[in-house]
Image (tube, rainbow, N blue to C red):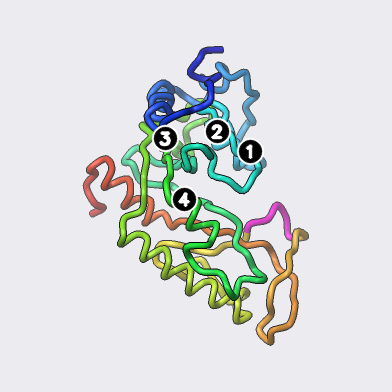
C-alpha cells in the first residue's frame, strides 16, 4: 500500500489536492486494489461505496460525525459521476433534511449551508455502460459557492423549509427548487420519520434528503474546466 492511499493527517488544502492529483487517472478498480478494499459487483446496494473509497484514499476523518469530511480544513468531499462530455449523470446528495423543530432555524445555521461552504469535487467518469472497476477518477478541485450561488441555494432552502414547516411535506416534488431539491432518502419504505401534516398534526413519512440538481453541478464544472455550455 502506497503513501498516497495511506495518508498522514492533512495540514493544508494543498496537501489534499496533491493526494487528489496522485490518484487522478486511476480506475476505481486500481484504487480499490491499492487500498485492499473489496469491490461490490455494482452500486445497486452500495450507493455510497465510491465516496467511501475516496474518503479512505484521501484521509477523510469525520466518519459518521456531524462534521465536514476533512474537519481540520473545513472541507466536504463529494464525488460527481459524469459522462465523457463532463456532464453530471445525476443529482448530488448533500445531507438529510430536518422535518421537525425547524421553525427557528435560518440558512446560515443549517447543516446544509455549513456542508456546502467548501467542497472538494471529485469527478468520476461513470457512464452506465462502464463497469464499476473501470470507471476513472478525474481531476478534483475545491469549490466555494459564489454570492449568486449562495443566494440561489438559500432561496430554495427557505422555500422548501417553509413547505415542511407548514405541513406540505407530501406535496414537495423533485421539480421544486431551481438548484436544490428535496427527495426521499431511505433504505426502504418502512424507514419512516416524524414530520408535520397538512393540518399541523404529527405524521410519519419517509426521510428526505437535500440534493443539488445536476444543472447546478454542471454549471460548476463548466466554470471550473471552461467547458462549452450545452447546445
Q: Residue 102's x, y, as percent?
A: 61, 71
Query: Which of these two is toward me, 5 or 144?
Result: 144
Mark pair 3, 1: CA separation: 25 Å
Q: Identify the residue position indicated by label 3 in the image.
A: 125
Badge nearest the viewer, 4 or 2: 2
The image quadrant that residue 21 belongs to is top left
What's the mark number on residue 63? 1
How far, Cα to Cα, is label 4 from label 3? Answer: 12 Å
Q: Position of residue 198 (x, y in %)?
A: 66, 84
Label 2 to label 3: alpha-carbon separation? 22 Å
Q: Earlier in the sequence, mark 4 or mark 3?
A: 4
Residue 173, position in %: x, y? 53, 70
Give the answer, above or below, for where 9 lies relative to 215. Answer: above
Q: Are marks 3 and 1 in contact (CB under 8 Å)?
A: no
Q: Is residue 146 left or right of residue 98?
A: left
Q: Quadrant of the N terminus?
A: top right
Asked if the magenta segment contains residue 186, the reply would be: yes
- Which is more N-terminal, label 2 or label 4? 2
Which stretch appears magenta? 185-189
Q: Which mark is residue 60?
A: 2
Q: Residues within 10 Å of mark 2 (few under 14, many from 20)?
A: many
Do the CB atoms of the residues marked 2 and 3 lie less than 8 Å apart? no
Amino acid at each position: 500500500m502506497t503513501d498516497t492511499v495511506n495518508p498522514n493527517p492533512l495540514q493544508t488544502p494543498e496537501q489534499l489536492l496533491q493526494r487528489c492529483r496522485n490518484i487522478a487517472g486511476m480506475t476505481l478498480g486500481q484504487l480499490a486494489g491499492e487500498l485492499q478494499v473489496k469491490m461490490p459487483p455494482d452500486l445497486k446496494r452500495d450507493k455510497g461505496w465510491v465516496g467511501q473509497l475516496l474518503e479512505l484514499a484521501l484521509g477523510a476523518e469525520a466518519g459518521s460525525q456531524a462534521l465536514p469530511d476533512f474537519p481540520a480544513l473545513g472541507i466536504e468531499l463529494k464525488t460527481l459521476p459524469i459522462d465523457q462530455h463532463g456532464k453530471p449523470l445525476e443529482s448530488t446528495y448533500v445531507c438529510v433534511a430536518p422535518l421537525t423543530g425547524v421553525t427557528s432555524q435560518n440558512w446560515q445555521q443549517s447543516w446544509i449551508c455549513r456542508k456546502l461552504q467548501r467542497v472538494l469535487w471529485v469527478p468520476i467518469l461513470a457512464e452506465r455502460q462502464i463497469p464499476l472497476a473501470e470507471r476513472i477518477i478525474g481531476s478534483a478541485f475545491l469549490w466555494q459557492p459564489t454570492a449568486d450561488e449562495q443566494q440561489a441555494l438559500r432561496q430554495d432552502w427557505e422555500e422548501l423549509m417553509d413547505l415542511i414547516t407548514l405541513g406540505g411535506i407530501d406535496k414537495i416534488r423533485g421539480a421544486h427548487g431551481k438548484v436544490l431539491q428535496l427527495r426521499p432518502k431511505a433504505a426502504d419504505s418502512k424507514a419512516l420519520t416524524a414530520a408535520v401534516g397538512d393540518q399541523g398534526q404529527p405524521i410519519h413519512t419517509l426521510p428526505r434528503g437535500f440534493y443539488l440538481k445536476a444543472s447546478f453541478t454542471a454549471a460548476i464544472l463548466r466554470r471550473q474546466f471552461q467547458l462549452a455550455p450545452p447546445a
